[in-house]
């Protein structure tokens, strides 16, 4: 019997060869000969440490994907500021030029909701249909919904521009959500053992450039309309639509490359092996059914020859299902460890940004929303956001890239969670004292928190799930872990955002920082459930012999 459907990848270890009792070379089953040939190909793939054009192309596509995703996600902060001038410039008192909190929260949380759904659905489809097919679909969804978001407007009575924008951005988030599990999985399966962590983290770190690109575009577009805006604030209606629309350009530029990508050999080999394991079971089931039918027939003996005893019993290979595999604690704890760690991180990662307005004000870039010209206010806030990202966020990403193969994923994650726990305890219990006595001291602590978020769990929570799960479940499991992170983001933006002004403006932030410290401590401890993947092949990390029984 030969393979008729090979869409996936993995090798057959010596243990498995003995377990399957493969016959001597002269009598070897054609299926096993094929699997051994695939095993040799996979060993060559793991030993290849040189970058080639195909790998560079894939890294470029994946890196641009995360730059694009970050731009689409974080540009909404600038857009929300502009929408306040467009739709509430004639409001009275403190409400003037500011989007009401309910609408502000709605449009900012939309992408996170969509991401959560996309990570679960697209992650699962990535294992079922194929990585690159679903990867291409997620980009096309993102492009279409980005353009649609830019043309959002009030449709009918009761459905204003914010509701329409929310709907389109949920769908945009669904497309973005697919990028998380599929990007990590694709890069992980293509990269060699010695640079796998560096490549996955480098792709993810392009997110930092997207964070900076959004305010840069905001400055450029606002500057182009500056004179018109100063005469009539409604010209900002063009500005926010252009800022959102520009978000589709990187995706369109790489669409052809993404459409022409092929699934990795590892993924193809794993599907072949799983298919073979299940084929063995099907053959046995058919034989037993045939025997039962003939037994019930009166002429059974005339139709069936007495089977000759085999010289060596052949054990049937059967691939475990997702439920069977993760019902074992040794595997479930890894999934829980990656998911809880990502959830804990994102609660604080999105929550700490509640303080960004304080830092922007401290460095003199906040402006006066009621008295400054709209163009000046927007540009200064965009400059402040660029400075904040360059202080600790972007450097943190790239420190991780250049140290992850030396220090290891687990060590960086533990160190990051430990440092963040300490920093949030200091900020939480001495918040007002630090701000009152030393604003520069607060900025230093805030910068260190951003640094250790990215030179720490923000990078590793993305990298680790792309390595520690079997190939057949890798995209699904990564999607579950990533969706847990987005749940944390929703909790932070939808829940804690509403609490920060409890008792007065920013009066509850010190208590929120104390809560974040607790989440960081939880992330620290669940990291011990996760194996170290540095220097190991994907098959060694997962002990793939346990995928079958």
Image: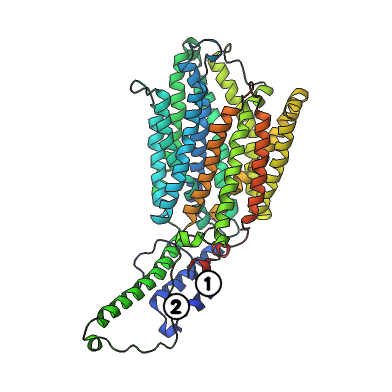
Q: Earlier in the sequence, mark 2 or mark 1?
A: 1
Residue under the point 68% across and 35% down? 514
- Say which element carries label 1: loop
Horizontal side, residue 438 vs residue 470: left or right: right
Q: What's the residue at 63%, 46% (across, down)?
A: 457
Displayed quadrant of residue 169: top left
Measured as percent of width and height from the top left, residue 210 is found at 54, 36
The residue pinned by badge 2 equals 315
Callout 2 secondary element: loop
Q: Residue at x 69, y 41 (%)?
A: 420
Residue farthest toward the right in the current orientation of the protein: 437
The one nearer the camera, 521 or 21, is 521
Residue 437: percent from the left, percent from the top?
A: 78, 24
Q: Mark 1 points at which residue?
A: 13
- At horizontal 43% and vertical 41% (from top left) the residue drawn is 175
Q: In this view, does 227 lie to the left or right of 296?
A: right
Most extreme residue toward the left, as rendered?
298
Q: Is residue 251 placed above or below 278 in the rendered structure?
A: above
Q: In which quarter of the image is residue 128?
A: bottom left
Q: Which of marks 2 and 1 is in front?
A: 2
Residue 81 is marked as: none
């Amino acid at each position: 019997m030969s393979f008729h459907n090979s869409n996936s990848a993995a090798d057959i270890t010596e243990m498995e060869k003995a377990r399957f009792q493969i016959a001597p070379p002269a009598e070897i089953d054609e299926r096993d000969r094929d699997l051994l040939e695939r095993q040799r190909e996979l060993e060559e793939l793991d030993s290849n440490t040189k970058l080639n054009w195909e790998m560079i192309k894939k890294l470029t596509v994946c890196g641009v994907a995360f730059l694009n995703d970050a731009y689409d996600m974080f540009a909404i902060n600038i857009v929300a500021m502009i929408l306040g001038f467009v739709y509430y410039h004639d409001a009275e008192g403190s409400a003037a030029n500011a989007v009401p909190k309910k609408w502000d929260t709605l449009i900012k949380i939309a992408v996170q909701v969509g991401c959560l759904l996309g990570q679960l659905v697209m992650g699962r489809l990535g294992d079922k249909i194929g990585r690159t097919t679903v990867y291409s679909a997620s980009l096309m969804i993102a492009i279409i919904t980005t353009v649609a978001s830019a043309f959002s407007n009030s449709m009918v009575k009761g459905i204003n521009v914010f509701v329409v924008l929310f709907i389109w951005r949920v769908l945009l988030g669904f497309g973005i959500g697919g990028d998380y599990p599929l990007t990590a999985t694709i890069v992980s399966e293509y990269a060699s053992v010695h640079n796998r962590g560096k490549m996955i983290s480098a792709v993810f770190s392009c997110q930092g450039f997207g964070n900076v690109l959004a305010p840069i575009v905001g400055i450029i577009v606002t500057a182009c309309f500056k004179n018109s805006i100063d005469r009539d604030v409604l010209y900002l209606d063009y500005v926010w639509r252009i800022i959102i629309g520009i978000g589709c350009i990187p995706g369109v530029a790489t669409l052809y490359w993404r459409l022409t990508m092929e699934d990795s050999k590892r993924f193809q080999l794993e599907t072949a092996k799983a298919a073979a394991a299940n084929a063995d079971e099907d053959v046995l089931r058919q034989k037993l059914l045939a025997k039962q039918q003939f037994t019930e027939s009166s002429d059974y003996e005339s139709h069936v020859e007495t089977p000759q005893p085999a010289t060596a019993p052949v054990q049937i290979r059967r691939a475990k299902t997702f439920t069977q595999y993760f019902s074992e604690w040794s595997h479930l704890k890894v999934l829980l460890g990656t998911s809880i760690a990502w959830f804990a991180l994102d609660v604080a990662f999105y929550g700490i940004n509640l303080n960004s307005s304080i830092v922007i004000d401290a460095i003199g870039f906040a402006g006066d929303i009621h008295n400054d010209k709209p163009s000046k206010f927007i540009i200064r806030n965009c400059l402040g956001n660029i400075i904040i990202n360059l202080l600790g966020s972007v450097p943190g990403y790239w420190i991780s890239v250049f140290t992850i193969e030396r220090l290891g994923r687990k060590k960086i994650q533990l160190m990051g969670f430990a440092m963040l726990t300490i920093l949030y305890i200091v900020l939480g219990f001495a918040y007002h004292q630090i701000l009152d006595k030393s604003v520069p001291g607060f900025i230093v602590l805030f910068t260190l928190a951003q640094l250790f978020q990215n030179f720490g769990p923000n990078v590793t929570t993305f990298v680790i799930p792309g390595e520690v799960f079997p190939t057949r479940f890798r995209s699904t499991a990564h999607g579950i872990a990533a969706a847990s992170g987005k749940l944390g983001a929703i909790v932070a933006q939808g829940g804690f955002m509403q609490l920060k002004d409890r008792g007065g403006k920013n009066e509850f932030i010190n208590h929120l920082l104390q809560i974040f410290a607790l989440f960081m401590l939880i992330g620290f401890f669940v990291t011990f459930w996760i194996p170290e993947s540095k220097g190991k092949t994907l098959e060694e990390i997962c002990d793939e012999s346990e995928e079958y029984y």
